[in-house]
Image (cartoon, grey):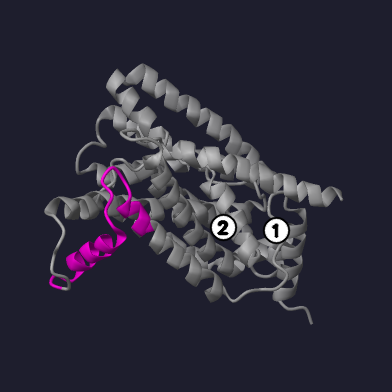
Amino acid sequence: MTTVAEPVAQAADRDHRSHPAAPSAPPRRRPLGLILVPLVALLLMSIAAGVSLGSVSIPIGDVWAIVAHRIAPGSFEPWWTQAREAIVIESRLPRSLMAAAVGASLAVAGGVAQSVTRNPLADPYLLGVSSGAGFGVVVLTVLGIGAGVWGVFTLPMAAFLGALLPLAGVILVARRAHDTTAIVLVGAAMTMVFGALNTFVLLVLGDDHQLGTVMRWLAGGFGDAGWTMLWAPLGILAVAGTVVLLCSRHLDLLLTGDDGATAMGVNVPRFRILMLLLVSLLTAGAVAVSGTIGFIGLLIPHLAGYLTGRTSARLLPTAAVLGAVALVLADLAARSVSDGAELPVGVVTGVIGGPVFLLMLWRRYGKASV
């Protein structure tokens, strides 16, 4: 008698063999805890380094003491200055936490997009979701609605509504074509369309100040990070990530193909729409606070798959932590390039992520050609 696990395992094996980017899977399956615990420790150390280093260096021991004192007053007798406490609590800590939340969101969104489309090159940017989210934010910025306190609420909503526009086109064409390749092709077209719309809105409707503001935002970064902006990506990640994990078995069944998943009881069209909506929501929450940051959603799921295999219940949590670590370190690198200057984080992820992804492609195709 054939079990549910057998076709999933066979499909996962086929997916891995045909995967153009992922390295070879580990020979044996490691317990998930042995993977996540070191990664979470690395994440905590990365956040501590991100808070510690900067134009004013603060010892990591002082960082932990300041945070502990703020959480539990009286746990330490303060020996640090009020200025250093303000730097840690009001500036660097929310910035590092926001980078972690955005990195985790983009990595999970990329992993889900690749599973739903069965395409290793799919990510929120290639599907057009990011460009649509950016369009929503650009329109709101040009209209002057996203400024001030209300921007904490209006920007994520505008980003999500903007992300739905290209997603609607992707879904309509994909349902008609009954082909996951159509999702990626239409998404690529939507990316160009909404990129052009962003330029049009800025040049025709925006002024020079808005143009400079939006261009810096589109390059990606966390210069405006604060506690009030942090709750949107964190809340979206918690809700959407939980739903995705609960649906991980159905994501694995999609590896068998639409017919195989349908035979296992999955309503494939509805499930695919639900997952793409969650991808849009995760991307919108990230783009609204950070701008467009490339390669996290594309590259991190492949690295997570190398550590865990392609099973969604193992891959997605690992990808979330890896994405958080990667973007915290990228933000730290962006702040550390030179004194008094800060690179856009999207530049750092592009400079590092591009060659790494090319190396993974070269290794994969090199092994396949032997």
The x, y position of residue 93, in whole percent, is 28, 54
* Residue 270: mark: 2
CB under 8 Å between discs 1 and 2: no
Task: Determine whether, in the image, residue 320 is placed left or right of residue 302.
Answer: left
Is residue 89 found left or right of 32 in the rendered image?
left
The residue shown at (30%, 31%) is 141
- Residue 178 visible from this viewpoint: no
Give percent across and percent down for residue 368.
82, 51
Q: Amino acid type of disc 1?
A: Asp
- Rounded to the nearest angstrom, the CA distance separating label 1 from label 2 is 12 Å
Foreground pick, 161 / 235: 235
Instruction: Give the main secondary structure of the magenta stretch.
Output: helix
Which of the pair 38/293 is nearer the observer?
A: 38
Label 1 residue SS: helix
Q: Is residue 53 left or right of residue 122?
A: left
Element assignment for label 2: helix
Which region shows up in magenta?
47-74
Mark 1, Cα crowd under 10 Å, few <14 / some 14-19 / many 20+, is some
The residue lying toward the viewer, choosing from 70 and 8, is 70
Q: Residue at coordinates 40% horizontally, 45% vertically from top-left?
A: 331
